[in-house]
Structure formats: C-alpha cells, structure tokens
Amino acid sequence: MFVDGVKVVADPILTNEEIAHFVAEEKRLWEGKNKKLGQLELGIEGEEIVLKATEKSPIRRVRRITGYLSSIDNFNDAKVAECNDRAKHVVQ
C-alpha cells in the first residue's frame, strides 16, 4: 500500500490511522535530514512496533524509444504503447 507517496508494508494488526501516524512521523524525521522516505516496514515484536525505513532512490529508469530518451512518464500514448510492445530479453 502507499501512504502519502511512501510504500508501506505493515502488520495487518495495525490500523490505517496508526500507519498514517508512523508515516507522517518518519517523513518529518527524514525531511529534517534533507532525505526522502521511500519505504516503511512496520512490524510487531512482542509489545513493540518495529520500523524499518528505506531512503527513496534518486535513480530513475530512462528508456530510448525511436529517438527519444526520457522516462516513461513523459511519453505520449503512442510511445507508451511502443514501449509496452517491445520484446524483453532475459539473460540467464
């Protein structure tokens, strides 16, 4: 699930309100360090809630489709279709 732009993996015992609270608190802490929170894992160990936070990677995937070098979110519908129709090769 995503909460406020952060991917969250949480124990099913936690409520949506609790999850939103932890996400908001962690985002505030990370922004104080000039970093972006990318993922938050919330688990329960006994009586404690365990948080594992991961920084959002600044790496973007860039593709080249018929002469255009860009990320897929900048492609028009035709370029997205062309990208989806491409053959994918797997190295084994």
Image (cartoon, rainbow, N blue to C red):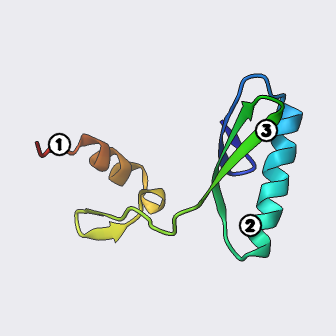
Q: Which of pointers 3 and 1 lies earlier in the amino acid sequence? A: 3
Q: What is the three-letter code of the residue carrying label 1?
A: Ala
Residue 51, x across and y down, in percent: 71, 46
Q: Callout 3: 10 Å neighbours few (<14), some, many (20+)? A: few
Left or right: 60, with 88 as reference point = right
Frontmost residue, 40 versus 86: 40
Separation of marks 3 and 1 at Cα, in angstroms? 44 Å
Residue 44 occupies quadrant: top right
Q: Say how many tags the image has.
A: 3
The residue that mark 1 highlights is 87
The residue that mark 2 highlights is 30
Residue 37, x across and y down, in percent: 67, 60
User: Against 47, is 8 above or below?
Assistant: below
Residue 71 occupies quadrant: bottom left
User: Against 85, is 55 above or below?
Assistant: below
Q: What is the three-letter code of the residue carrying label 2?
A: Trp
User: Against 67, is 65 above or below?
Assistant: above
User: Against 33, is 45 above or below?
Assistant: above
The residue that mark 3 highlights is 49
Q: Quadrant of the N terminus?
A: top right
